[in-house]
Amino acid sequence: MLPFESDYNNGAHPELLRRLVETNSQTSLTYGFDQWSQSAREKIRVAADAPNADVYFLTGGTQTNMTVIDGCLQPYEAVVSVETGHINIHEAGAVEFTGHKVIALPHHNGKMSGLELDAFMRQFTDDDSREHLAQPGMVYITFPTEFGTIYSKDEIEDIYGICQRYGLKLFIDGARLGYGMMAEGVNISLPWLSRHCDVFYIGGTKVGALCGEAVVFPRGNAPKHFFTTIKRHGALSAKGRTIGVQFDALFTDNLYFEISKHAIKMAMRLKAILQSKGYQFFIDSPTNQQFVVISNDRIKQLAEQVEFTVWEPYAADAKVCRFVTSWATTDEQLNELEKWV
């Protein structure tokens, strides 16, 4: 089967495996206090131009989202997301499980509108009964979005400005951060992102690692006892070195962004193949996720040879399907795909 179902349906980049094997016989401190995790933290601080950043390594994306949100909010506070946000639809209620309501706003090609966020907050603050409500304490966006779309600098600046005006924290989910930053026409860098949010994370699981995410509080602004909060949420690896070694490799010689660039190159070729075959695109994505409309009959035929995701209904006789490339996608796989689509 041709693997276009996701960007984490493989192992790890060979360089990461090499480093894991190379360091395997060495002993170290545990829980992320090892020498490789410390080195990775410093490399991330340099890459983000955030010398005072607090950097933590967590096991996976869902654990990261629920831990950051719960750790940053008071028990009575809620997080604002778009209705298609990952925390709202694809995490089995993990955030609500911690006791925090997810307030869902409309999405526009997967993105949040600053105007609608501001209107919601004005309405909330003008409500005389607001003390009876879950109090908004954070805004959550993803970069790139669930539909592979990208926020512009102006859009993020607008949202961050609104957050600051109303005393909200801005949390940017970067599970696919490398793929977003390497997309054509994107001029958002790690240093820029570090200056325009309160916390973000650099996804490893979907960008070349076996597992692991790097949470960055860019101004050393991690909540008190955040390490304890990570452990309380089951997101702390006893053998923290397994994540630290991988991020140390990912942030050596720009590897993280080089392998992300490869995925984008493969995605644009995938896009061209689908266009040449006459497929209708559901949304225009510049990233490694491509969404096309396929008839129900054709879906059954393709599924015999190609792994992809049936995303959502489109019409009575068709559905939106997602094809994803990754750091591991090859030209040979695309050549074979072209024969079947």
Image (tube, helix red, strand yellow):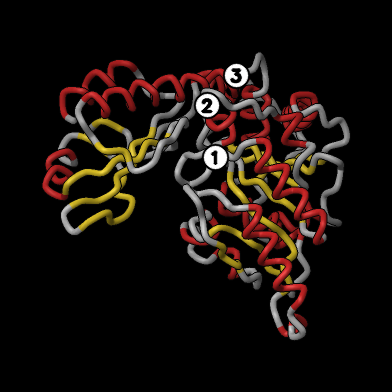
What is the CA distance from the residue labelled 1 to the residue labelled 3? 19 Å
Q: Nearer the viewer, mark 3 or mark 2?
A: 2
Q: Amino acid at mark 2?
A: Ala
What residue lies at 16% left-to-right and 23% top-to-bottom? Answer: 339
- Left or right: 56 as drawn, with respect to 65: right
Q: CA distance from mark 1 to mark 2?
A: 10 Å
Image position, residue 191 (x, y; %): 76, 29
Please, what secondary structure does the residue beneath circle 3 have?
helix
Upstream in the sequence, badge 3 or badge 2?
2
Q: Residue at x 52, y 29 (%)?
A: 208
Quadrant in which the N terminus appears? top left
Mark 1 lies on a secondary structure that is: loop
Disc 2 secondary structure class? loop
53 left or right, relative to 113: right
**Residue 83 position in % (x across, y down):** 51, 61
Q: Are marks 1 and 2 in contact (CB under 8 Å)?
A: yes
Look at label 3 and name its amino acid: Leu
What residue is pinned by disc 2?
Answer: 183
| Of the pair 213 and 325, the residue shown nearer to us | 325
Residue labelled with disc 1: 144
Of the two numbered discs 1 and 3 on the same chain, state the one appearing first in sequence: 1
Disc 1 marks which amino acid?
A: Pro
Q: Give the number of marks.
A: 3
Q: Residues within 10 Å of mark 3 (few under 14, many from 20)?
A: some
Q: Is 320 situated left or right of 79 in this image?
A: left
Name the residue carrying label 3: 255
